[in-house]
Image: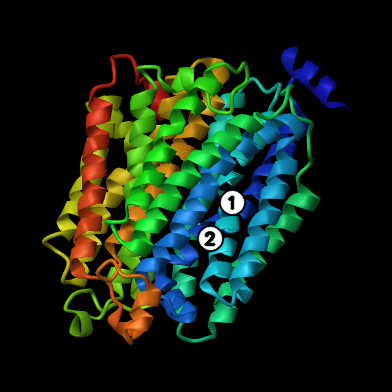
């Protein structure tokens, strides 16, 4: 029986049996992909200090890994999403998994900071997995009268697998890092991603794309140039210090180049980035919130890991935790993320959608503000991250669907994807800024070596961590303000359906 005949059966009221049977197997295979995604997102965080030692770099420079990966991720989302609509979601999922596997294996054999940075950036291709998986489920359910609800259910299963795998990944690396060599530790995620590539290749059927036309390569080049200039300027600030005029000139040029990019996109029938939709009064507060939310939820991860493992006897600050405890900290955080996400429908009914999201932003801000006075005891770290996690979980769950609810029906996919893209851009810029804040007196590593300073002395100052937490809290507060000024009707109960 062909797909067309099954669709015809559904339109005549007959249940499409093969679609029903097939979708369970498809979701099961896609769960394995999200297991790999969760491993990638949770595995490395407890061992960032050990990675810094492995590469003989100061811990502040580890933030550049996150910045590079987030920039690649931000650029991947609109480009690969468009490509998937053209040639098929399975093919692009396979392509992105191959790139992620390549990056993961580069990390295993990387002999230097630069090579490791390239591998880490390539690994960022995984960010498009979840949107493509949801699209695959939605496509496979074509003709099913209960398509939307079953797609949401499938997406919820995938997200649940992701969150559980983050905890498993974090606990695994925390236990292994002191027992086996770093080469073995770094090889495990590469093996997992490679196995998932085979699962997709052999188990997921490809269907042709529905879209026509092509890819807006000019728009992609313009936005890549803008981000590249901003990031180059921030790298120059890190290397030469905040007084380096050329660095800030590069940042200003990158920001200014967004204007011709916007004008070009406004003149396109099928733009890479729909500027008209993004500037809609109902849409921009959500996208601004996603950008600001990326600062703490993505940019703040590495500083928390390195601070937790800092020895208070040697540095005068830190929790003195080992990688295993950082795994526990991540586990608590992810559990509170899940609680925040699953209780969002209840809080939305009690407070309204807008107020629930504003409260979530305030919880994130409170969690990071608590780090400023309370950062000496492990229980304080657990409480701080639990508070931030409750708010973060609600925002992770609500922002994509809130953006879709505030968009026209034919642009919901773009609006949802842009919350991920803007969040990753916010996280990339924050990671760069945090790398500067955690630099040792603004000096480059080469300068430290020339002065004869040891790596152990090249430790980030406490003031840098205080700056990180203040910036994370400030970003969350600004997000609350952005949501507060959104016009009435921007949010609906459709925005929090699970």
Residue 495 is tagged as none
Vertical relation: 151 (above or below) 160: above
In this view of the protein, which residue sits in the foreground, 485 or 468? Answer: 468
* Cβ–Cβ under 8 Å for marks 1 and 2: yes
Query: From this viewpoint, which residue is outermost toward the front?
Result: 245
Q: Is residue 435 visible?
A: no
Q: Could you tell me which quadrant the N terminus lies in? A: top right
x and y percentages locating residue 342 in the rendered image: 37, 41
Residue 466 can be seen, yes or no: yes
Q: Residue at point 67% right, 23% down? A: 144
Mark number for residue 126? 1
Judged left or right of residue 476, residue 112 is right
Q: How many marks?
A: 2
Q: Which mark is residue 40?
A: 2
Question: What x and y, as percent, mark residue 476?
Answer: 25, 42
Left or right position of 58 against 8: left
Q: Residue furthest left?
A: 373
- Residue lying at 77% horizontally and 20% vertically, measured from the top left: 7
Using the image as rendered, state which of residue 255 and residue 476 is in the foreground.
255
Crowding near the residue tagged with mark 2, few <14, some 14–19, many ≥20 C-alpha atoms within 10 Å: many
Mark nearer the N terminus (1 vs 2): 2
- Image position of 471 with respect to 330: above or below: above
Q: Position of residue 84 (x, y in %)?
A: 69, 35
Hey, which quadrant is residue 167 in on the image? bottom left
Q: CA distance from mark 1 to mark 2?
A: 9 Å
Is disc 1 placed on a helix, strand or loop? helix
In the image, residue 280 sits, relative to residue 249, either above or below, namely above
Q: Residue at x 71, y 23 (%)?
A: 211
Which residue is more in the foreground, 210 or 352? Answer: 210
SS at circle 2: helix
**Above/below status of 203 relative to 304:** above
**Residue visible at 37% across and 82% down?**
449
């Amino acid at each position: 029986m062909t797909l067309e005949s099954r669709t015809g059966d559904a339109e005549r009221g007959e249940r499409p049996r093969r679609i029903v049977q097939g979708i369970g197997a498809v979701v099961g295979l896609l769960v394995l992909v999200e297991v790999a995604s969760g491993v990638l997102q949770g595995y490395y965080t407890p061992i960032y200090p050990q990675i810094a030692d492995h590469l003989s770099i100061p811990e502040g420079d580890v933030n550049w890994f996150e910045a590079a990966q987030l920039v690649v991720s931000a650029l991947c989302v609109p480009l690969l999403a468009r490509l998937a609509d053209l040639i098929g979601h399975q093919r692009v999922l396979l392509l992105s998994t191959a790139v992620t596997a390549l990056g993961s294996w580069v990390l295993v054999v990387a002999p230097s900071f630069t090579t490791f940075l390239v591998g880490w950036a390539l690994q960022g291709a995984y960010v498009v997995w979840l949107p493509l998986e949801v699209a695959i489920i939605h496509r496979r359910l074509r003709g099913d009268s209960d398509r939307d609800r079953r797609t949401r259910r499938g997406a919820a299963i995938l997200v649940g697998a992701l969150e559980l795998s983050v905890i498993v990944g974090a606990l695994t690396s925390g236990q292994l890092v002191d027992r086996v060599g770093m080469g073995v530790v770094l090889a495990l995620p590469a093996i997992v991603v490679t196995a998932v590539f085979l699962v997709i290749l052999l188990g997921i059927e490809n269907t042709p794309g529905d879209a026509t036309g092509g890819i807006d390569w000019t728009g992609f080049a313009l936005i890549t140039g803008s981000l590249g200039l901003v990031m180059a300027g921030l790298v120059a600030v890190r290397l030469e210090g905040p007084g380096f005029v050329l660095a800030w000139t590069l940042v200003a040029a990158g920001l200014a180049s967004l204007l011709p990019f916007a004008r070009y996109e406004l003149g396109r029938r099928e733009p890479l980035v729909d500027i008209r939709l993004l500037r809609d009064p109902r849409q921009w507060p959500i996208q601004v919130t996603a950008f600001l939310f990326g600062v703490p939820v993505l940019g703040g991860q590495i500083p928390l890991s390195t601070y937790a493992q800092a020895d208070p006897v040697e540095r005068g600050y830190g929790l003195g935790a080992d990688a295993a405890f950082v795994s526990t900290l991540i586990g608590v955080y992810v559990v509170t993320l899940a609680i925040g996400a699953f209780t969002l429908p209840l809080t939305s009914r009690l407070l309204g959608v807008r107020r629930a999201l504003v409260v979530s932003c305030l919880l994130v801000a409170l969690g990071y503000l608590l780090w400023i006075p309370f950062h000496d005891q492990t229980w304080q770290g657990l409480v701080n991250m639990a508070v931030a996690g409750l708010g973060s979980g609600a925002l992770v769950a609500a922002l994509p669907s809130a953006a879709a609810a505030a968009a026209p029906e034919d642009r919901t996919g773009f609006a949802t994807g842009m919350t991920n893209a803007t969040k990753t851009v916010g996280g990339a810029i924050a990671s760069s800024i945090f790398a500067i804040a955690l630099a040792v007196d603004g000096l480059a590593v080469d300068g430290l070596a020339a002065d004869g300073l040891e790596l152990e002395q090249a430790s980030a100052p406490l003031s840098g961590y205080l700056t990180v937490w203040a910036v994370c809290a400030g970003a969350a507060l600004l997000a609350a303000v952005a949501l507060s000024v959104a016009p009435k009707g921007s949010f609906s109960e459709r925005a929090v359906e699970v």
